[in-house]
Amino acid sequence: MKKKADLPTKTCPVCQRSFAWRKKWKDCWPDVKYCSERCRRSKLSLMSRRNNTSERPHA
């Protein structure tokens, strides 16, 4: 059995935490970008907040 320290890791672009490879991701590890479903869902709100703040006129 492999130790967790030996598994590949990535950094989540939403929360900036590192996360390790999981068995359920064995077939799609190159496509995994987010550490959790919560971060995957919140990326949409993060992107829309960034776009809205850049379009707002400055007073």
Image: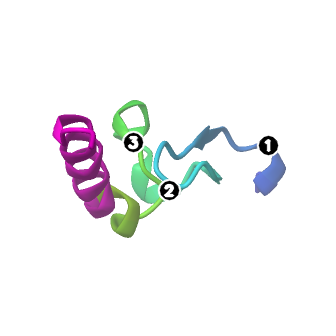
Mark 3 belongs to which amino acid?
A: Val
Question: Local crowd at mark 2 within 10 Å, few (<14), some, or many (≥20)?
Answer: few
Image check: 53 left or right of 22?
left
Per the image, the residue denoted by label 2 is: 23
Comes first in the chain, label 3 or label 2: 2
- Provide the residue designation for mark 1: 6
Label 2's element? Answer: helix
For image coordinates 79% across by 43% down, the residue present is: 6
First of labels 1, 2 by sequence position? 1
Q: Quadrant of residue 33?
A: top left
Foreground: 20 or 44?
44
Mark 1–mark 2 Cα distance, whole angstroms, equals 14 Å
Q: Left or right: where does residue 21 sit relative to residue 45?
A: right
Judge depth for marks 3 and 2 and give the one in front: 3
| Residue 57 or residue 22, whichever sits in front | 57
Q: Please tell me whether mark 1 or mark 3 is closer to you in this view.
A: 3
- Is disc 3 placed on a helix, strand or loop? loop
Q: Which residue matches tag 3?
A: 32
Vertical placement of residue 40 versus 12, above or below: below
Q: Residues within 10 Å of mark 3 (few under 14, many from 20)?
A: few
Amino acid type, label 2: Lys
- In this picture, which residue range is highlighted in magenta? 41-59
On the picture, is 31 further left or further right than 20? left
